[in-house]
Amino acid sequence: MNSGFGIVLDAEILRQAQRGKNAAFDAIYRLYGRACYNLALRIVGEPAAAEDIVQDVFLRMMGSISKFRGDSPFGAWLKRMMVNSTIDVVRRNRRIDRADPEDHFAGLAAEGASAEVRVDAWNVLMRLTPRERAVVILHELEGYTHKELAQLFDQSESYSKSILARSLKRVVDSGQNLREEEEDTSHDQT
């Protein structure tokens, strides 16, 4: 079963949405809303900002769905809108407040991962700037190429390669630091 952006949108729901039917938009939101929110949250790291991005994208989608030609799956089209809008927010907001990872880790790591692993992953990602986090998530988790990242950020491919290499090093270093801190804490308790 497909999930997230891989869900296939029923052709009738698409036709109804293209005719402006609210019930069809509700169905689309139920199908894709969580995937949109999780993607935005992973990148911006702030729940309120992620919610705003999702709302803006769905409003734009409602206005432009009549132009959707079906050249690619609907989920891919919507995901592209999400990524572009999220990157726009990252560009506008050089600094987005870092959220408390304990409050917002649900759905941020692969399904089936323990809550502890999700919190650790969130903690490590939150040590990156929003721009660095966006590059890491889009490249490593979403499969974007350096060419696509360069286009998204209006930069060269070497820019995204540099950001990715530097960010991954910080992720590895941060992960090691977290493990060392946990080991020190556990030794202090014995």
Image: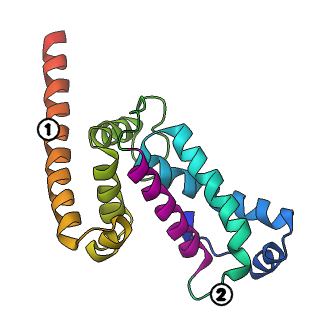
Q: Report the coloring of the rendering.
A: rainbow
The reply to whether residue 170 is in sight is yes
| Left or right of residue 110, residue 37 in this image | right
Query: Gap between marks 2 and 1, in whole Å?
Result: 47 Å
Q: Position of residue 27 (x, y in %)?
A: 77, 63
Q: Position of residue 146 (x, y in %)?
A: 26, 72
Residue drawn at the location 84% of the way across and 76% of the way down: 19
Point out the tag, 2 or 1, that comes first from the N-terminus. Answer: 2
Tell me, yes or no, whether the highlighted magenta stretch contains residue 85.
Answer: yes
170 to 151, vertically: above or below? above
- Which span is picked out in magenta? 73-93
In the rendered structure, find residue 20 and report the number of the disc placed on it: none
Say what amino acid the circle numbered 2 marks. Answer: Arg
In the rendered structure, find residue 176 and report the number of the disc placed on it: 1
Residue drawn at the location 47% of the way across and 63% of the way down: 83
Q: Position of residue 12 (x, y in %)?
A: 81, 80
**Which type of secondary structure does the marked residue at label 1 adopt?**
helix
Say what amino acid the circle numbered 1 marks. Answer: Gln
Please say if the residues under marks 2 and 1 sit with CB atoms less than 8 Å apart: no
Tell me, yes or no, whether the highlighted magenta stretch contains residue 47.
Answer: no
Local crowd at mark 2 within 10 Å, few (<14), some, or many (≥20)?
A: few
Instruction: Name the quadrant containing residue 116.
Output: top left
**Which one is nearer the viewer's eye here, 72 or 129?**
129
**Which type of secondary structure does the marked residue at label 2 adopt?**
loop
Count of all numbered marks drawn on residues in the image: 2
In the rendered structure, find residue 69 and report the number of the disc placed on it: 2
Residue drawn at the location 19% of the way across and 10% of the way down: 189
